[in-house]
Amino acid sequence: MKLRWLGHSAFEFVSDEGIDILVDPFIRANPSCKIPIDDLNPDVICITHGHADHFGDAVEIARNSNSFVVCNYEISNYLQRKGIDAIGINVGAVISLNGINIRMLDARHSSSYDFEMDIGYAGNPCSFLFEFENCLKVFHAGDTALFSDLKFVVGDVYKPDVAILPIGNIFTMDPTEAAIAAGWINPKFVIPMHYNSFPSIKQDANQFRQLIKKESPDCETILLNPLEEIEL
């Protein structure tokens, strides 16, 4: 599976069978992502919550690519009214698409259509667990605080190989809490996200790496530059 960080919380996963999944497609207004949205052609788009820096360019990308969108029920209704093929699921649900399991799990945050003139409720925020054809499990935490499900559900029950965690503070966990979360989840690899996109979430990723070495010495921290791709 190939993984590419598009900056902030946006990630692109391409499975061994060529299925392209785009998570939190914040592209045009993302200062870390210097690619045109026409370069993206996902089969599936997953949206963790309604905030503009996560919902992003979902509508235009889905229309351009004829993508299928996985999100919460409230966002799916919003997208369906715009003619987008979207399925709304809720925490605990799993759907299988082309041999890939996509499970919606909880996150502790807020969610609204803050990009509309009248801010509206956009359902509960979520995280996603992806299980690919080769059984590799990747957890994208979305925007979240530190909370016990990261240990007792994500870590103890689902045991992901890769955990992608926010470290920016202000809106999410800070590096110290994210390192605790990584210790609870106990993945083989941890990737920080949701930092350095804006001055308010400036963080030193190397500090996070040192915290991981202390909390989880068997876990490898992967620090990516925006648009960098790796193979797992």
Image (cartoon, helix red, strand yellow):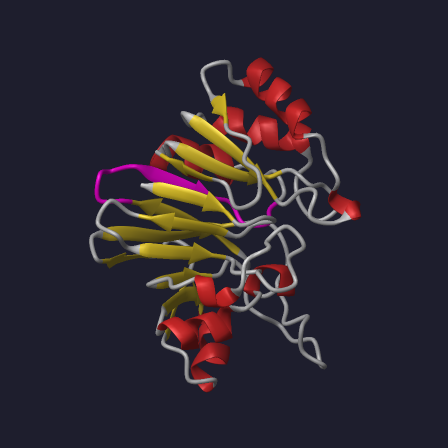
Q: Position of residue 197 (x, y in %)?
A: 69, 48
Magenta-colored span: 132-144
Question: Residue 149, can we see it?
Answer: yes
Q: Quadrant of the N terminus?
A: top left
Q: Position of residue 35 (x, y in %)?
A: 54, 58
Q: Position of residue 15 (x, y in %)?
A: 29, 47
User: Is 143 included in the stretch rendered in magenta?
Assistant: yes
Question: Residue 75, can we see it?
Answer: no
Q: In screen coordinates, is 71 left or right of 98?
A: right
Where 168 falls versus 23 (above or below)?
above
Where 174 falls versus 140 (above or below)?
above
What residue is shown at x 56% (from left), y 65% (from top)? 55
What residue is shown at x 45% (from left), y 62% (from top)? 39
Where 181 falls versus 72 (above or below)?
above
Which quadrant of the view contains residue 21?
bottom left
Of 214 and 221, the residue lying toward us: 221
Of 68 and 94, the residue lying toward us: 68
Which quadrant of the view contains residue 188?
top left
User: Is 139 included in the stretch rendered in magenta?
Assistant: yes
Where 41 falls versus 210 (above or below)?
below
Q: Quadrant of the C terminus?
A: top left
Q: In screen coordinates, is 230 left or right of 25?
A: left
Give the mark count.
0
